[in-house]
Amino acid sequence: MFLMIHMGIGKVWKLLLLKDIEPGASQDWLTSLGALGERIRDVFEKSPTLIVALYTVIFYSIITLMVLTVFILLNRRKMEKTQVLEDELNEKYQGLLVDYFFRKDIADKVEKELKRIANSEFNRGILINQIIDMSVNMQDKEKAQLKDLYIKLGLKEDSLKKVYSKKWHENIKGFRELAFMNIREANERIIKLLNSPNRILRMEAQIALVRLSDENPYKFLDFLDQPLSVWEQITIHELLIQHNLSAPDFSQWLKSSNLTIVRFSLQMIARFNQTAALPGVLSLLKHDDDTVRKEAIRTCGELGQKEALPVLSEIYYDEEHQNKEEVLKAFGKVPDATYLEFLNGVLDAEDDVRLQILATKAMENLDEPGVARLIKLMKSKSEYKNYRIIIRHVLDRRIY
Protein backbone atom coordinates (compact mmCIF):
# COMPACT_ATOMS: atom_id res chain seq x y z
CA MET A 1 0.00 0.00 0.00
CA PHE A 2 2.68 2.53 1.07
CA LEU A 3 4.78 1.54 -1.97
CA MET A 4 1.86 2.28 -4.30
CA ILE A 5 1.27 5.68 -2.66
CA HIS A 6 4.97 6.51 -2.93
CA MET A 7 5.02 5.57 -6.61
CA GLY A 8 1.87 7.61 -7.22
CA ILE A 9 3.34 10.73 -5.63
CA GLY A 10 6.49 10.28 -7.69
CA LYS A 11 4.51 10.08 -10.94
CA VAL A 12 2.50 13.19 -10.08
CA TRP A 13 5.64 15.21 -9.38
CA LYS A 14 7.09 14.01 -12.70
CA LEU A 15 3.96 15.15 -14.50
CA LEU A 16 3.96 18.55 -12.80
CA LEU A 17 7.66 19.06 -13.54
CA LEU A 18 7.17 17.89 -17.19
CA LYS A 19 10.03 15.45 -16.87
CA ASP A 20 8.39 12.94 -19.22
CA ILE A 21 7.48 15.48 -21.92
CA GLU A 22 9.62 15.44 -25.04
CA PRO A 23 12.33 18.13 -25.15
CA GLY A 24 10.92 19.72 -28.29
CA ALA A 25 7.50 20.17 -26.71
CA SER A 26 8.88 22.39 -23.92
CA GLN A 27 9.58 25.12 -26.48
CA ASP A 28 5.92 25.85 -26.85
CA TRP A 29 4.06 26.20 -23.52
CA LEU A 30 0.73 25.47 -25.14
CA THR A 31 2.11 22.26 -26.61
CA SER A 32 3.65 21.37 -23.23
CA LEU A 33 0.38 22.02 -21.46
CA GLY A 34 -1.52 19.89 -23.94
CA ALA A 35 1.00 17.11 -23.60
CA LEU A 36 0.72 17.33 -19.82
CA GLY A 37 -3.05 17.05 -20.07
CA GLU A 38 -2.77 14.00 -22.33
CA ARG A 39 -0.28 12.35 -19.99
CA ILE A 40 -2.50 13.01 -16.96
CA ARG A 41 -5.48 11.49 -18.78
CA ASP A 42 -3.46 8.43 -19.75
CA VAL A 43 -2.17 7.97 -16.22
CA PHE A 44 -5.69 8.27 -14.76
CA GLU A 45 -7.09 5.77 -17.28
CA LYS A 46 -4.36 3.19 -16.69
CA SER A 47 -3.95 3.57 -12.90
CA PRO A 48 -5.77 1.60 -10.18
CA THR A 49 -8.64 3.31 -8.34
CA LEU A 50 -6.54 3.99 -5.22
CA ILE A 51 -3.85 5.76 -7.24
CA VAL A 52 -6.49 7.80 -9.11
CA ALA A 53 -7.96 8.89 -5.79
CA LEU A 54 -4.49 9.78 -4.54
CA TYR A 55 -3.79 11.83 -7.68
CA THR A 56 -7.08 13.68 -7.21
CA VAL A 57 -6.38 14.50 -3.57
CA ILE A 58 -2.86 15.73 -4.34
CA PHE A 59 -4.08 17.79 -7.28
CA TYR A 60 -6.79 19.54 -5.28
CA SER A 61 -4.45 20.02 -2.32
CA ILE A 62 -1.88 21.77 -4.51
CA ILE A 63 -4.53 23.98 -6.14
CA THR A 64 -6.02 24.85 -2.74
CA LEU A 65 -2.59 25.67 -1.33
CA MET A 66 -1.84 27.94 -4.26
CA VAL A 67 -5.18 29.76 -3.93
CA LEU A 68 -4.77 30.20 -0.17
CA THR A 69 -1.22 31.48 -0.60
CA VAL A 70 -2.35 34.09 -3.12
CA PHE A 71 -5.28 35.10 -0.88
CA ILE A 72 -3.08 35.44 2.22
CA LEU A 73 -0.49 37.50 0.37
CA LEU A 74 -3.15 39.82 -1.08
CA ASN A 75 -4.89 40.18 2.28
CA ARG A 76 -1.60 40.90 4.02
CA ARG A 77 -0.81 43.55 1.45
CA LYS A 78 -4.23 45.09 1.97
CA MET A 79 -3.80 45.13 5.76
CA GLU A 80 -0.40 46.80 5.44
CA LYS A 81 -1.87 49.52 3.20
CA THR A 82 -4.78 49.99 5.62
CA GLN A 83 -2.41 50.34 8.57
CA VAL A 84 -0.28 52.89 6.74
CA LEU A 85 -3.41 54.89 5.83
CA GLU A 86 -4.69 54.66 9.40
CA ASP A 87 -1.39 55.93 10.82
CA GLU A 88 -1.38 58.84 8.37
CA LEU A 89 -4.97 59.77 9.24
CA ASN A 90 -4.34 59.51 12.98
CA GLU A 91 -1.42 61.88 12.73
CA LYS A 92 -3.36 64.31 10.54
CA TYR A 93 -6.46 64.25 12.75
CA GLN A 94 -4.41 64.79 15.90
CA GLY A 95 -2.80 67.89 14.42
CA LEU A 96 -6.12 69.29 13.22
CA LEU A 97 -7.87 68.67 16.54
CA VAL A 98 -5.06 70.39 18.45
CA ASP A 99 -5.34 73.37 16.09
CA TYR A 100 -9.11 73.41 16.59
CA PHE A 101 -8.76 73.85 20.35
CA PHE A 102 -5.67 76.02 20.61
CA ARG A 103 -5.88 78.17 17.49
CA LYS A 104 -9.30 79.75 17.63
CA ASP A 105 -8.54 82.00 14.65
CA ILE A 106 -8.53 79.04 12.27
CA ALA A 107 -11.15 76.87 14.01
CA ASP A 108 -13.65 77.24 11.13
CA LYS A 109 -10.99 76.37 8.60
CA VAL A 110 -9.99 73.30 10.61
CA GLU A 111 -13.62 72.18 10.83
CA LYS A 112 -13.98 72.40 7.04
CA GLU A 113 -10.75 70.45 6.57
CA LEU A 114 -11.96 67.72 8.92
CA LYS A 115 -15.20 67.46 6.95
CA ARG A 116 -13.24 67.19 3.72
CA ILE A 117 -10.95 64.43 4.97
CA ALA A 118 -13.68 62.45 6.74
CA ASN A 119 -15.36 61.61 3.46
CA SER A 120 -15.72 57.86 3.98
CA GLU A 121 -16.95 55.52 6.68
CA PHE A 122 -13.38 54.30 7.30
CA ASN A 123 -12.02 57.83 7.70
CA ARG A 124 -14.88 58.89 9.98
CA GLY A 125 -14.36 55.83 12.17
CA ILE A 126 -10.72 56.82 12.75
CA LEU A 127 -11.77 60.41 13.49
CA ILE A 128 -14.30 59.19 16.07
CA ASN A 129 -11.58 57.17 17.79
CA GLN A 130 -9.30 60.22 17.89
CA ILE A 131 -12.06 62.37 19.38
CA ILE A 132 -12.79 59.74 22.04
CA ASP A 133 -9.10 59.39 22.92
CA MET A 134 -8.81 63.17 23.28
CA SER A 135 -11.96 63.45 25.43
CA VAL A 136 -10.53 61.14 28.09
CA ASN A 137 -8.09 63.78 29.39
CA MET A 138 -10.32 66.83 28.97
CA GLN A 139 -12.30 68.89 31.46
CA ASP A 140 -16.06 69.42 31.19
CA LYS A 141 -15.82 72.63 29.14
CA GLU A 142 -13.46 71.14 26.56
CA LYS A 143 -15.54 67.95 26.44
CA ALA A 144 -18.61 70.01 25.60
CA GLN A 145 -16.71 71.69 22.73
CA LEU A 146 -15.53 68.32 21.48
CA LYS A 147 -19.07 66.97 21.63
CA ASP A 148 -20.27 69.97 19.62
CA LEU A 149 -17.63 69.29 16.96
CA TYR A 150 -18.59 65.60 16.95
CA ILE A 151 -22.20 66.54 16.17
CA LYS A 152 -21.29 69.20 13.59
CA LEU A 153 -19.18 66.73 11.63
CA GLY A 154 -22.13 64.33 11.44
CA LEU A 155 -20.32 61.66 13.42
CA LYS A 156 -23.27 61.17 15.76
CA GLU A 157 -25.23 59.65 12.89
CA ASP A 158 -22.42 57.13 12.34
CA SER A 159 -22.58 56.04 15.98
CA LEU A 160 -26.38 55.79 15.93
CA LYS A 161 -26.16 53.68 12.79
CA LYS A 162 -23.87 51.27 14.63
CA VAL A 163 -26.25 51.05 17.58
CA TYR A 164 -29.12 50.04 15.29
CA SER A 165 -26.99 47.65 13.23
CA LYS A 166 -27.83 43.94 13.16
CA LYS A 167 -24.19 43.11 13.94
CA TRP A 168 -23.51 42.84 17.66
CA HIS A 169 -19.90 44.04 17.45
CA GLU A 170 -21.13 47.16 15.65
CA ASN A 171 -23.69 47.68 18.43
CA ILE A 172 -20.90 47.63 21.01
CA LYS A 173 -18.88 50.25 19.09
CA GLY A 174 -21.95 52.47 18.94
CA PHE A 175 -22.61 52.04 22.69
CA ARG A 176 -19.09 53.12 23.58
CA GLU A 177 -19.04 56.09 21.24
CA LEU A 178 -22.36 57.47 22.46
CA ALA A 179 -21.36 56.88 26.09
CA PHE A 180 -18.11 58.82 25.67
CA MET A 181 -19.96 61.67 23.95
CA ASN A 182 -22.81 61.54 26.52
CA ILE A 183 -25.48 61.27 23.81
CA ARG A 184 -28.69 59.60 24.98
CA GLU A 185 -30.81 59.47 21.87
CA ALA A 186 -30.39 55.69 21.58
CA ASN A 187 -31.05 54.80 25.24
CA GLU A 188 -34.29 52.98 24.40
CA ARG A 189 -32.48 50.81 21.87
CA ILE A 190 -29.71 50.06 24.38
CA ILE A 191 -32.33 49.11 27.00
CA LYS A 192 -33.84 46.61 24.58
CA LEU A 193 -30.45 44.93 24.17
CA LEU A 194 -30.07 44.48 27.94
CA ASN A 195 -31.71 41.08 27.60
CA SER A 196 -29.84 39.96 24.51
CA PRO A 197 -28.72 36.30 24.54
CA ASN A 198 -25.22 37.62 23.78
CA ARG A 199 -23.53 38.03 27.20
CA ILE A 200 -20.89 40.50 25.92
CA LEU A 201 -23.55 42.67 24.32
CA ARG A 202 -25.58 42.65 27.54
CA MET A 203 -22.61 43.76 29.61
CA GLU A 204 -21.68 46.55 27.19
CA ALA A 205 -25.29 47.77 27.24
CA GLN A 206 -25.19 47.87 31.04
CA ILE A 207 -21.92 49.80 31.05
CA ALA A 208 -23.26 52.30 28.51
CA LEU A 209 -26.44 52.90 30.52
CA VAL A 210 -24.47 53.46 33.73
CA ARG A 211 -22.61 56.27 31.97
CA LEU A 212 -25.67 57.62 30.18
CA SER A 213 -27.86 57.97 33.28
CA ASP A 214 -28.34 61.21 35.17
CA GLU A 215 -29.57 60.55 38.69
CA ASN A 216 -29.66 56.76 38.87
CA PRO A 217 -26.79 54.94 37.11
CA TYR A 218 -28.41 51.59 37.97
CA LYS A 219 -31.78 52.38 36.42
CA PHE A 220 -31.18 49.62 33.89
CA LEU A 221 -31.84 47.07 36.66
CA ASP A 222 -35.54 47.85 36.24
CA PHE A 223 -35.42 46.32 32.76
CA LEU A 224 -32.97 43.45 33.22
CA ASP A 225 -34.48 39.96 33.02
CA GLN A 226 -31.27 38.04 32.34
CA PRO A 227 -29.06 36.94 35.29
CA LEU A 228 -26.59 39.58 36.45
CA SER A 229 -23.28 37.70 36.53
CA VAL A 230 -20.61 38.30 39.17
CA TRP A 231 -18.29 39.73 36.53
CA GLU A 232 -20.97 42.19 35.41
CA GLN A 233 -21.59 43.21 39.02
CA ILE A 234 -17.89 43.88 39.60
CA THR A 235 -17.52 45.83 36.34
CA ILE A 236 -20.53 48.04 37.02
CA HIS A 237 -19.49 48.70 40.61
CA GLU A 238 -16.00 49.73 39.44
CA LEU A 239 -17.60 52.17 36.97
CA LEU A 240 -19.58 53.70 39.82
CA ILE A 241 -16.39 54.30 41.81
CA GLN A 242 -14.23 55.30 38.84
CA HIS A 243 -16.62 57.99 37.60
CA ASN A 244 -17.52 59.14 41.12
CA LEU A 245 -21.22 58.48 40.57
CA SER A 246 -23.64 58.71 43.48
CA ALA A 247 -24.98 55.38 44.73
CA PRO A 248 -28.77 55.05 44.45
CA ASP A 249 -31.04 53.60 47.13
CA PHE A 250 -30.63 49.91 46.40
CA SER A 251 -33.64 48.91 48.50
CA GLN A 252 -35.83 49.75 45.48
CA TRP A 253 -34.70 46.48 43.87
CA LEU A 254 -35.13 44.17 46.87
CA LYS A 255 -38.50 43.03 45.51
CA SER A 256 -37.21 42.30 42.01
CA SER A 257 -38.20 38.98 40.47
CA ASN A 258 -34.60 38.63 39.26
CA LEU A 259 -32.84 37.02 42.24
CA THR A 260 -29.38 37.97 41.00
CA ILE A 261 -30.45 41.62 41.19
CA VAL A 262 -31.80 41.10 44.71
CA ARG A 263 -28.52 39.59 45.90
CA PHE A 264 -26.51 42.32 44.18
CA SER A 265 -28.68 45.01 45.80
CA LEU A 266 -28.11 43.46 49.23
CA GLN A 267 -24.36 43.52 48.64
CA MET A 268 -24.49 47.17 47.59
CA ILE A 269 -26.62 48.08 50.63
CA ALA A 270 -23.90 46.62 52.81
CA ARG A 271 -21.12 48.18 50.72
CA PHE A 272 -22.55 51.70 50.98
CA ASN A 273 -23.90 51.20 54.53
CA GLN A 274 -27.46 52.11 53.59
CA THR A 275 -28.96 51.57 57.05
CA ALA A 276 -32.28 53.07 55.95
CA ALA A 277 -32.78 49.94 53.84
CA LEU A 278 -32.83 47.68 56.93
CA PRO A 279 -36.64 47.09 56.91
CA GLY A 280 -36.42 45.80 53.34
CA VAL A 281 -33.46 43.61 54.23
CA LEU A 282 -35.31 42.13 57.23
CA SER A 283 -38.27 41.27 55.01
CA LEU A 284 -35.94 39.02 52.98
CA LEU A 285 -34.91 36.94 56.00
CA LYS A 286 -37.95 34.77 55.32
CA HIS A 287 -37.52 34.65 51.53
CA ASP A 288 -38.12 31.31 49.80
CA ASP A 289 -34.64 31.25 48.24
CA ASP A 290 -31.78 30.09 50.50
CA THR A 291 -29.15 32.23 48.76
CA VAL A 292 -31.24 35.39 49.15
CA ARG A 293 -31.72 34.68 52.86
CA LYS A 294 -28.00 34.07 53.25
CA GLU A 295 -27.14 37.40 51.64
CA ALA A 296 -29.79 39.18 53.71
CA ILE A 297 -28.37 37.72 56.95
CA ARG A 298 -24.85 38.76 55.93
CA THR A 299 -26.10 42.27 55.13
CA CYS A 300 -27.70 42.56 58.58
CA GLY A 301 -24.32 41.83 60.12
CA GLU A 302 -22.53 44.34 57.88
CA LEU A 303 -25.04 47.10 58.69
CA GLY A 304 -24.44 46.54 62.41
CA GLN A 305 -27.99 47.39 63.48
CA LYS A 306 -29.32 45.76 66.67
CA GLU A 307 -32.86 45.92 65.30
CA ALA A 308 -31.99 42.88 63.18
CA LEU A 309 -31.00 40.65 66.12
CA PRO A 310 -34.53 39.61 67.24
CA VAL A 311 -35.38 38.38 63.75
CA LEU A 312 -32.03 36.62 63.37
CA SER A 313 -32.46 34.76 66.66
CA GLU A 314 -35.99 33.81 65.63
CA ILE A 315 -35.01 32.24 62.31
CA TYR A 316 -31.77 30.61 63.49
CA TYR A 317 -33.01 27.08 64.27
CA ASP A 318 -35.06 26.86 61.07
CA GLU A 319 -32.09 27.66 58.83
CA GLU A 320 -29.67 25.33 57.05
CA HIS A 321 -26.05 25.04 58.17
CA GLN A 322 -24.50 27.80 56.03
CA ASN A 323 -27.16 30.31 56.97
CA LYS A 324 -26.73 29.42 60.66
CA GLU A 325 -23.07 30.33 60.27
CA GLU A 326 -24.02 33.70 58.83
CA VAL A 327 -26.44 34.34 61.71
CA LEU A 328 -23.72 33.67 64.29
CA LYS A 329 -21.25 35.84 62.37
CA ALA A 330 -23.83 38.64 62.45
CA PHE A 331 -24.18 38.30 66.23
CA GLY A 332 -20.40 38.48 66.44
CA LYS A 333 -20.41 41.79 64.53
CA VAL A 334 -23.29 43.28 66.53
CA PRO A 335 -22.56 42.56 70.22
CA ASP A 336 -25.60 42.73 72.50
CA ALA A 337 -25.54 41.16 75.97
CA THR A 338 -29.32 40.71 75.75
CA TYR A 339 -28.67 37.69 73.55
CA LEU A 340 -26.15 36.00 75.82
CA GLU A 341 -28.63 33.25 76.71
CA PHE A 342 -29.45 32.68 73.05
CA LEU A 343 -25.76 32.23 72.19
CA ASN A 344 -25.26 30.01 75.23
CA GLY A 345 -28.17 27.88 74.05
CA VAL A 346 -26.65 27.58 70.58
CA LEU A 347 -23.31 26.52 72.05
CA ASP A 348 -25.02 23.88 74.16
CA ALA A 349 -27.42 22.61 71.47
CA GLU A 350 -25.14 22.40 68.43
CA ASP A 351 -22.80 19.47 67.82
CA ASP A 352 -21.09 21.01 64.79
CA VAL A 353 -17.65 22.36 65.76
CA ARG A 354 -17.81 25.27 63.30
CA LEU A 355 -21.08 26.53 64.79
CA GLN A 356 -19.75 26.11 68.32
CA ILE A 357 -16.66 28.17 67.47
CA LEU A 358 -18.76 30.98 65.97
CA ALA A 359 -21.12 31.01 68.96
CA THR A 360 -18.14 31.13 71.35
CA LYS A 361 -16.56 34.03 69.46
CA ALA A 362 -19.87 35.92 69.47
CA MET A 363 -20.09 35.45 73.26
CA GLU A 364 -16.50 36.63 73.69
CA ASN A 365 -17.33 39.81 71.76
CA LEU A 366 -19.85 40.68 74.50
CA ASP A 367 -16.82 41.52 76.66
CA GLU A 368 -17.21 41.02 80.42
CA PRO A 369 -20.60 39.26 80.50
CA GLY A 370 -19.73 36.95 77.64
CA VAL A 371 -16.20 36.15 78.81
CA ALA A 372 -17.43 35.49 82.37
CA ARG A 373 -20.03 33.05 81.05
CA LEU A 374 -17.44 31.25 78.89
CA ILE A 375 -15.06 30.87 81.84
CA LYS A 376 -17.90 29.47 83.95
CA LEU A 377 -18.80 26.95 81.23
CA MET A 378 -15.17 25.94 80.80
CA LYS A 379 -14.68 25.32 84.54
CA SER A 380 -18.02 23.62 85.09
CA LYS A 381 -17.67 20.19 86.70
CA SER A 382 -21.06 18.97 85.59
CA GLU A 383 -21.55 16.75 82.55
CA TYR A 384 -18.56 16.98 80.16
CA LYS A 385 -19.13 19.08 77.06
CA ASN A 386 -16.84 19.02 74.04
CA TYR A 387 -17.11 22.79 73.64
CA ARG A 388 -14.86 23.32 76.71
CA ILE A 389 -11.83 22.77 74.47
CA ILE A 390 -13.21 25.27 71.97
CA ILE A 391 -13.75 27.85 74.73
CA ARG A 392 -10.21 27.36 75.97
CA HIS A 393 -8.80 27.98 72.52
CA VAL A 394 -11.02 31.01 71.84
CA LEU A 395 -10.03 32.64 75.14
CA ASP A 396 -6.35 31.89 74.60
CA ARG A 397 -4.91 35.25 73.41
CA ARG A 398 -1.88 33.51 72.01
CA ILE A 399 -4.08 31.93 69.35
CA TYR A 400 -6.68 34.62 68.63
Image: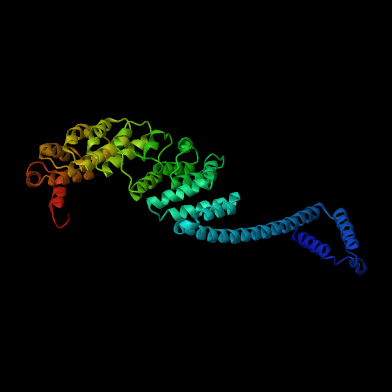
Rendering coords of residue 130 (x, y %): 50, 55
3 sits to left or right of 114:
right
In front of the other: 104 or 283: 104
- Residue 23: which quarter of the image? bottom right
In the displayed image of the protein, which residue is found farthest to the front? Answer: 105
Residue at image coords 50%, 45%: 151
Residue at image coords 17%, 56%: 399
Residue at image coords 54%, 60%: 92
Rendering coords of residue 17 (x, y %): 82, 65
27 over 139 or under it: above or below = below
In front of the other: 188 or 108: 108
Which quadrant is the N terminus positioned in? bottom right
36 over 223 or under it: above or below = below
Rendering coords of residue 275 (x, y %): 22, 38
Is residue 125 visible to us here? yes
Residue at image coords 39%, 51%: 141
74 sits to left or right of 238:
right
100 over 352 or under it: above or below = below
Which quadrant is the C terminus positioned in? bottom left
84 sits to left or right of 329:
right
In the displayed image of the protein, which residue is found farthest to the right? Answer: 24
